[in-house]
Image: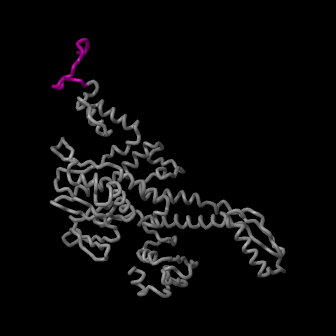
């Protein structure tokens, strides 16, 4: 039973409800739709479904009158673009699992169970990219992402994702965490901290995350309200066409009024009759009304909303297709914007994943790390220039570079070239030309 039904105690009949503290009530029928949709001058707003009522009672309705939930927020282009960009980048970056041999040596540990889980099959129906994209989207839209660990022989063999709305996090007196989970059949279970894979970013209590939607609710609500207004305006011809007047000593008959109303509706409804000739009768006069430039500032308001939403998610507006600004804080070039996005936005999310993955590996010498170099793999010039520097200064071998490019090793490719002007023998002594006067 929904919160709507639990509050009002019935699912049929007319139920008066209004979320504004006053004014005329809204009547809800058995379908959950309001029988009369209206907005009063005192600032009330329409609740059209029981789900929207539940969201409003949880405080998810802003001053704009729009109920902002993860589902409704994704209908705003800027929100969808930010979530798609961040979640897609997490999904496509490869994760390397390595083992620390000593303070200086690392070896590949791709045969570890966690590496196989993250690279091949996190569960029985999802691929790694699908799993990571969905979990990251949950973090961005709901603040938390949960997956139940399937443990066998001391190793995590699968991660079963659970919708955040079915999980409640609770901290016990001994400071450990417990998770109350509602199964799909409605039965509750309690899961310990060691059995739950829990991702969250910004937190105010230390164990449960908050989402940008919590603090961007007014901005997103204003964007949705503005979109509704623009859609309604364009539906009626994108302009107030004009007004019809008649002499004071005359009165329009009912048949003439009905014909005029139908003609006006056709005239402004778009299609073949839009912009055509309007035939008036009984002394009526048509007066054109033009819209002032101030009334047409919707596009500027939309730009402002996009910029503010991008600020909440930490995404440059140009990276979601908004090229109205210069993004001067991170530079004007694509490379500077990509570097700023990687350093100030993506690294925060990647470290969140790396720490939670490391927490489910029993061996402290094994760790997981995203290959951040893959962020520039689409820029072949920058990638090859970085390889050349690594080879020139001797901190990468040709075979290591070839491995990064997914190529087979070559014979004698494990050599490390000495840096320029420091060539020497095995003892480290520099070799100098006998004709060199300094020698």
Q: Position of residue 77 (x, y in %)?
A: 49, 59
Q: Position of residue 311 (x, y in %)?
A: 44, 56
The number of discs equals 0
Residue at the top extreme of this rendering = 435
Give the color scheme: rainbow, by chain, secondary structure or one colour. Answer: one colour
Question: In this orientation, which residue lies closer to the viewer: 351 or 166?
Answer: 166
| The quadrant where residue 421 appears | top left
In the displayed structure, 398 sits above or below 102; it is: above
Q: Position of residue 260 (x, y in %)?
A: 76, 74
Q: Is 383 situated left or right of 173 in this image?
A: right
- The reply to whether the magenta stretch includes residue 157 is no
Q: Is 385 situated left or right of 147 in this image?
A: right
The residue drawn where x is 22% and y is 51% is: 367
Bounds of the magenta segment: 422-439
Q: Is 246 situated left or right of 397 in this image?
A: right
The residue drawn where x is 39% and y is 84% is: 6
Q: Quadrant of the C terminus?
A: top left
In the displayed structure, 334 sits above or below 32; it is: above
Q: Quadrant of the N terminus?
A: bottom left
């Amino acid at each position: 039973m929904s919160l709507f039904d639990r509050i009002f105690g019935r699912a049929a009949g007319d139920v008066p409800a209004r979320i504004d503290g006053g004014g005329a009530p809204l009547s809800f029928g058995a379908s959950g739709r309001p029988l009369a949709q209206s907005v009063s001058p005192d600032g009330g707003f329409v609740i059209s479904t029981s789900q929207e009522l539940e969201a409003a009672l949880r405080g998810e309705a802003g001053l704009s009158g729009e109920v902002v939930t993860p589902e409704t927020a994704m209908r705003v282009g800027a929100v969808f673009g930010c979530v798609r960009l961040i979640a897609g980048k997490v999904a496509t970056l490869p994760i390397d699992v390595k083992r620390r041999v000593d303070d200086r040596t690392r070896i590949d540990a791709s045969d570890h169970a966690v590496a196989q889980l993250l690279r091949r099959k996190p569960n029985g129906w999802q691929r790694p990219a699908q799993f990571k994209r969905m979990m990251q989207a949950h973090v961005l839209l709901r603040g938390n992402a949960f997956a139940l660990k399937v443990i066998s022989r001391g190793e995590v063999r699968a991660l079963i994702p659970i919708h955040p709305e079915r999980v409640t996090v609770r901290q016990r007196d001994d400071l450990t965490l417990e998770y109350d989970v509602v199964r799909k059949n409605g039965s509750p279970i309690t899961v310990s901290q060691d059995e739950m894979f829990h991702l969250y970013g910004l937190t105010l209590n230390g164990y449960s995350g908050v989402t940008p939607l919590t603090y961007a609710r007014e901005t997103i609500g204003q964007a949705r309200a503005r979109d509704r207004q623009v859609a309604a305006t364009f539906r009626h011809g994108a302009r107030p066409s004009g007004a019809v007047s008649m002499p004071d000593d005359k009165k329009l008959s009912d048949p003439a009024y009905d014909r005029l109303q139908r003609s006006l509706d056709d005239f402004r409804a778009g299609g073949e009759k839009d912009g055509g000739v309007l035939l008036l009768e009984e002394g009526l006069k048509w007066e054109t009304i033009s819209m002032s430039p101030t009334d047409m500032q919707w596009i500027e308001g939309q730009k402002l909303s996009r910029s503010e939403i991008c600020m909440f998610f930490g995404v440059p507006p140009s990276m979601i297709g908004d090229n109205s600004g210069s993004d001067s804080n991170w530079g004007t070039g694509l490379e500077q914007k990509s570097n700023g996005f990687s350093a100030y936005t993506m690294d925060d999310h990647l470290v969140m994943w790396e720490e939670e993955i490391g927490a489910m590996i029993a061996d402290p010498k094994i760790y997981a790390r995203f290959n951040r170099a893959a962020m520039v793999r689409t820029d072949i010039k920058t990638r090859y220039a970085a390889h050349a520097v690594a080879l020139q200064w001797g901190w990468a071998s040709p075979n290591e570079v070839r491995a990064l490019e997914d190529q087979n090793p070559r014979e004698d490719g494990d050599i490390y070239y000495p840096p320029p002007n420091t060539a020497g023998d095995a003892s480290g002594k520099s070799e100098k030309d006998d004709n060199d006067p300094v020698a």
